[in-house]
Image: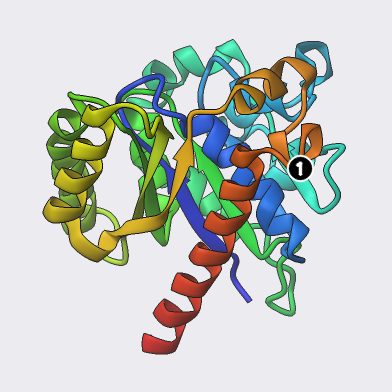
Amino acid sequence: MHPRVLTVANQKGGVGKTTTAINLGTALAAIGERVLLIDLDPQGNASTGLGVEVRARKLSTYDVLLGDATIADAAVATDVPRVSIVPATMDLLGAEITLATQKDRTHRLKHAIDALGGPDGSFPYTYILIDCPPSLNLLTVNAMAAANGILVPLQCEFFALEGLSQLLKTIEQVRSSINPELEIHGVVLTMFDPRNNLANQVIRDVRQFLGTKVFETVIPRNVRVSEAPSYGKPVLLYDLKCAGSQAYLKLASEIIQRERLLLAAE
């Protein structure tokens, strides 16, 4: 069975994209899923956050997009059971220029994911999460072209909704021209501080604007979540009991629940 492919995207930086991708992947693995993370951000923060050092990144998503390596070649196991990652390197900064003249430039990642399937139609992963760069470029379009759904992390702050309309427009363009299956899987509210009145107002506004697309689970602003990447670990491994870890576990079960409903409706 083809894995479910979820792209974590928001062109705004610092909203918790990578943190969400890493910890959601870990939470999904903790409940038995086999997860592959694809790091499409040249900064490679998801790779670092899962303990893959730069010198260990022999092959990367850049090689996969250029067709010089398969995902199976480039994927490395992490310290998290059932989680592998295709790491990123700074080479990705040049991917846009290199791919610009290629005919299938928007579908490179999709083809690479499809090629993971065995002759019997089996896949080594049940979930693939793609961590995008903080921009709406060809890398993000590749991620959207390959995805079943988009997860949008949204920081609970004043300008949260401002960038969202641009992202929704891009998703709509990709759906109409490249990937008619693409759905907004859900919006994840991140970095929530209950003492901040504005944050509570943002949550109300976002829920009013997007309704049921917004997940019930809200990710709190949490010191342990910020500390974990410097140890090369997801927060679930760094401190399972902290509020951030518990929130990501809740989010994972909510996503699985939503997935089941989507699959049942197909």
What residue is rendered at 14% in x and 34% in y? 166
Residue 130 or residue 63, whichever sits in front: 130
The C terminus lies in which quarter of the figure? bottom left
Observer able to see residue 185? no
Task: Measuring from the top left, give residue 205's x and y in whole percent.
Answer: 14, 44
Considering only vertical position in the picture, is 166 above or below 124? above
What residue is rendered at 44% in x and 53% in y? 146
What residue is rendered at 16% in x and 35% in y? 161
Task: Measuring from the top left, give residue 46's x and y in whole percent.
Answer: 62, 28
Residue pointed to by mark 1 = 240
Side (left or right) of 140 relative to 62: left
Task: Measuring from the top left, give residue 54's x and y in whole percent.
Answer: 75, 13
Residue 255 or residue 48, whichever sits in front: 255
The N terminus lies in which quarter of the figure? bottom right
Please tell me how crowded label 1 is: few (under 14), some (14-19), or many (20+) other residues with Cα within 10 Å: some
Task: Measuring from the top left, give residue 179's x and y in whole percent.
Answer: 29, 58
Q: Could you tell me the amino acid type at mark 1?
A: Leu
Residue 189 or residue 174, whichever sits in front: 189
The tally of labels here is: 1
Q: Quadrant of residue 78?
A: top right
At numbered mark 1, what does the secondary structure look like: helix, strand or loop?
loop
Q: How is the image coloured?
A: rainbow
Residue 250 or residue 70, whichever sits in front: 250
Observer able to see residue 20? yes
What residue is rendered at 48% in x and 41% in y? 219
Side (left or right) of 240 relative to 145: right
Considering only vertical position in the picture, is 235 above or below 5? above
